[in-house]
Amino acid sequence: AKADGKSSLRFFDAEMDQHIRERDQLERELKTAVARGDIRPFFQPLVDLRTKEIVGFEALARWSHPVLGAVPPDRFIPVAEDTGLIQELSESLLAESCRAALDWPTSVTLSFNISPVQLKEPTLGLRILAILARTGLPPSRLEIEITESALVRDLESARSVLTSLREAGVRLALDDFGTGYSSLYHLRNFKLDKIKIDRSFVSSMAHEHESAEIVSALVGLGHGLGLTITAEGVEGSEQEADLLARGCQQGQGYLFSQAVSAEEAVSLLRPGQDR
Ligand code: C2E
Ligand code: CA
Ligand code: CA
Ligand code: CA
């Protein structure tokens, strides 16, 4: 058993090494990638569960790396946060996303993720509004997605940024709802427009009574507070039917579409085309 422990430890070390090397590589190359525009937004539809219509798209960052291939955002967003590149990266992604959104019907909104680190910057609100003005996307068509950890880290800065955005007409969504901190506190203390129920509840609804009941309760709570509820990670039509039966209005997930390029997003919107 001792030998086993040792060899698995060595294996673990090798994996860690690999991980650290890759992170170093991403860190070195991130700046050029951002400058060259190798990291671009893809768009995943948000669907009205009753009408099946696309009501919005969430921009999701994709890095097509010349050697590593498609690097997922969970790998490079943390690097961008640590190196201070997140602001530049996020601004270029937002500008490109706004330009893409101008090709959609005016009722179709753009959802955009803001990292907790960015909310510590008090000028963030003004910067976002400047990008909207420059690209010509009306603030009412933008929805900013934040996670609860953003509100915990620097409450005062977050509050002033979010207030200035909201006053300009930008909508606010609380992402990954149910996984974080004191959720109910934030529902009371921040003016929100939407909560996105985390994928973990949606995926376990069918086999876990608790998850299904939590989804029902969140939908009821959201409605009582006048919020839109979006279910994340809808992968099957049973989940879709269950969500609909529990009164959830919006869904997002592989059942409808993965994140696609701006061109493909426009073609998903063409009338006559299902989903
Ligand atoms: P998120 O905001 O919770 O985004 C949803 C993630 O779930 C996306 O992963 C999406 O591709 C994935 N997803 C959507 N539908 C399904 C489904 O049916 N099943 C499963 N298993 N997964 C589904 P992705 O694109 O890898 O993004 C991961 C995270 O990276 C995002 O989580 C978000 O927190 C962050 N991120 C992505 N783009 C940006 C960005 O531009 N800025 C910032 N700050 N963060 C970003
Ligand atoms: Ca999100
Ligand atoms: Ca989410
Ligand atoms: Ca997430």
Image (spheres, rainbow, N blue to C red):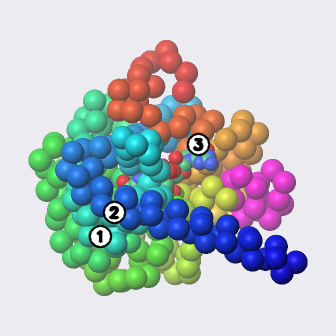
The residue type indicated by label 3 comes to: Gly
**Residue 244 placement (x, y as % from top left):** 68, 43
Determine the main secondary structure of the stretch shown in magenta.
Answer: helix
The reply to whether residue 135 is in sight is: yes
Look at 60% across and 64% down and name the residue there: 15
Stretch in magenta: 201-215
Would you identify the image quadrant in which residue 235 lies?
top right
Establish whether ligand 1 lies closer than 8 Å to the Cβ of label 3: yes
Q: Look at the numbered disc 1 and give the secondary structure of its residue.
A: helix
Which residue position holds label 3? 253
Answer with left or right where residue 12 lies relative to residue 93: right
In the drawing, what numbered circle is on residue 27? 2
Q: Verify whether residue 35 appears in magenta.
A: no
Q: Amino acid at mark 1?
A: Thr
Circle nearer the N terminus (1, 2): 2
Q: 10 Å neighbourhood of mark 1: few (<14), some, or many (≥20)?
A: few
Instruction: Please report the residue visible at 88 percent of the width from the left and 78 percent of the height from the top.
Output: 1
Question: Mark on residue 83?
Answer: 1
Answer with the quarter of the image where residue 210 lies.
Answer: bottom right
Q: CA distance from mark 1 to mark 2?
A: 8 Å
